[in-house]
């Protein structure tokens, strides 16, 4: 059963990538880099510092920094001095970035409807509970410095 579970995770991830990659590319985003997730996160909660954004996107700070640079070059994000703490920089969406983020949100909504097609609400809730527990089990094994300390 355990190897079957692993195979199901691999199979679902492969199909997810195959479905989303062309849509991300068509929107000018690099598939597999987490850029769509960054835009979606900033649409929900604009003006986060890099550490907060990294935690919310489940991404290490080095990868996040590279993504911020790339998205800034595309004109989708900008770095601003935090007015409450001048030593801190916040990341926020540009108008172009907000428009792209709305497209990403719609893409995620459509993708989720594909995921849950013909699955009962009850089964979805059970699956979410189980998957959350799997995430907790895995995250417990992370070294302390790899854990996110910001409430999600």
Image (cartoon, helix red, strand yellow):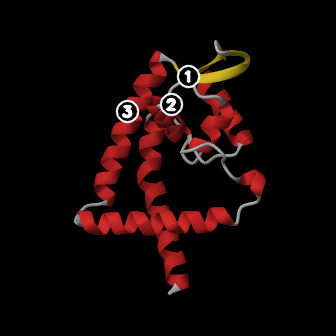
Say which quarter of the image contains residue 89: top right
Badge 1 crowding class, 10 Å Cα cut-off, few under 14, some 14 to 19, many 20 or more, is many
Q: Earlier in the sequence, mark 1 or mark 2?
A: 2
Which residue is identified by label 2? Answer: 42
Eyeballing the image, is 50 above or below 150?
above
Sequence-wise, the earlier of marks 1 and 3 is 1
**Element under label 2?**
helix
The Cα atoms of the two marked residues, 1 and 2, are separated by 7 Å
Total count of labels = 3
Q: Note whether 5 is above or below 125 in the view shown.
A: below
Residue to which mark 3 is pinned: 103
Residue 14, given in percent of the width and then of the height, sits at 49, 63
In terms of sequence position, does the residue under pointer 2 or pointer 3 come before the other? 2
Residue at image mark 1: 92
Q: Find the residue positioned furthest to the bottom.
A: 1
Residues 82 and 36: in front is 82
Q: Where is residue 18 shown, x and y percent of the image?
A: 45, 56
Q: Position of residue 79 (x, y in %)?
A: 64, 19
């Amino acid at each position: 059963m355990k190897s079957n579970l692993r195979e199901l995770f691999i199979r679902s991830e492969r199909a997810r990538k195959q479905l989303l990659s062309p849509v991300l590319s068509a929107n000018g985003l690099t598939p597999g880099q987490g850029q769509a997730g960054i835009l979606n996160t900033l649409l929900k909660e604009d003006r986060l510092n890099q550490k907060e954004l990294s935690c919310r996107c489940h991404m290490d700070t080095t990868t996040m920094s590279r993504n911020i640079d790339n998205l800034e070059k595309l004109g989708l994000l900008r770095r601003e001095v935090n007015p409450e703490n001048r030593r801190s920089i916040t990341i926020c969406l540009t108008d172009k970035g907000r428009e792209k983020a709305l497209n990403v949100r719609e893409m995620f909504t459509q993708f989720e409807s594909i995921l849950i097609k013909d699955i009962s609400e009850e089964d979805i809730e059970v699956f979410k509970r189980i998957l959350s527990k799997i995430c907790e089990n895995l995250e417990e094994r992370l070294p302390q410095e790899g854990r996110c300390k910001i409430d999600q």
